[in-house]
Amino acid sequence: MTARAVVSTFSAGRAPSQLAGWWLGAAIILAYANAVTLPFVFDDVSATVNNPTIRSLHEAWSAPPAGTSTVNRPVANLTLALNHVISGDAPWSYHATNVLLHALAALTLAGLVRRTLLLPGCGGRYNARSAAHIGACAALLWSVHPLLTAAVTPVAQRTEVLCGWLYLGVFYGFVRGLEQRQPWRWWAPAVGACALGMGAKEVMVTAPLLLLWFDLILLLFLVFNWARFFKIRNTFFECKSISVTRVQFSNNCNFFFRKVEIPFSDKFICISEMRTNHQSLSIGCRGQF
């Protein structure tokens, strides 16, 4: 696939992805609309009302009281300080920010799935519309799952929703960089998102490692021809010996050197095996594919 074809594919996918994004955002707002009217509960009080460091933006970088959910998480504490500037101790802006961050994370996930499916390594198996629909459905199932209410509804879980959005942003920036001739235009923001995420919650330190695994998966499953791999593997078990050489060292110990051909090719392998009266042990296998 040429560079022009890749660009046209992504450009054609903007319209369905934008429409899917609007539907996804509307579903999240409907699912969490009542969260804006909720009061502070449980750990929310210690993170907001009893947290003197959010009274000003300058003090937001200071260490909050012990036992607060934003201890050693200055970026999350700063977002709570911004909410205090907007609404003081009124909880509506805190809850609305959590819902907004969750919606941004869902949109980022939808974009990540869509652009991953449109990578040239997929071999054109997905068009722009189907990739947008798959990404939107995956993000929708994730965003409105009941288990996520424990992360979105409580204000004290600002660290969760903020880190989750930035975590997905790291992967989204990586995939966007794969589409560019100058990938660092997107990889640099991904590094910045990773750095900010470490100030939101400590789990962000796993992002670089998982990104390496993600890159390996893209290489193995999207680029490597697995159909050819399994075809070779199946024919290996159907191969036949074309020559066997036996070397007897004693009455109960024999060595067999077996030359095996691969069907439908001119390749072969050599297997050395030691057999005794009680067991058979494969010593080695060498050859060419």
Image (cartoon, grey):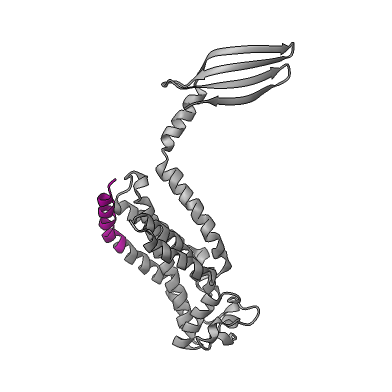
5 in magenta: yes
Task: Tell me: 62 left or right of 95.
Answer: right
Task: Tell me: 116 left or right of 234.
Answer: left
Q: Is residue 175 above or below residue 188?
A: above
**What residue range appears in magenta?**
1-18
Q: Nearer the viewer, residue 58 or 66?
A: 58
- Give the mark count: 0
Q: Is residue 134 above or below residue 72?
A: above
Q: Where is residue 221 in the image (x, y as percent from the top left)?
A: 44, 44
Q: Position of residue 20 (x, y in %)?
A: 32, 61
Residue 42 visible? The answer is no
From the image, which quarter does the N terminus lie in? top left
Task: Tell me: 56 left or right of 131.
Answer: right
Q: Quadrant of residue 18?
A: bottom left
Residue 256 visible? The answer is yes
Q: Nearer the viewer, residue 150 or 272?
A: 272
41 in magenta: no
Question: Residue sitting at 39 percent across and 71 percent down?
Answer: 29
Q: Position of residue 74 (x, y in %)?
A: 55, 77
Question: Residue sitting at 74 percent across and 14 percent down?
Answer: 252
Q: Which of 82 and 275 is in front in this view?
A: 275
Question: Residue sitting at 52 percent across and 86 percent down?
Answer: 58
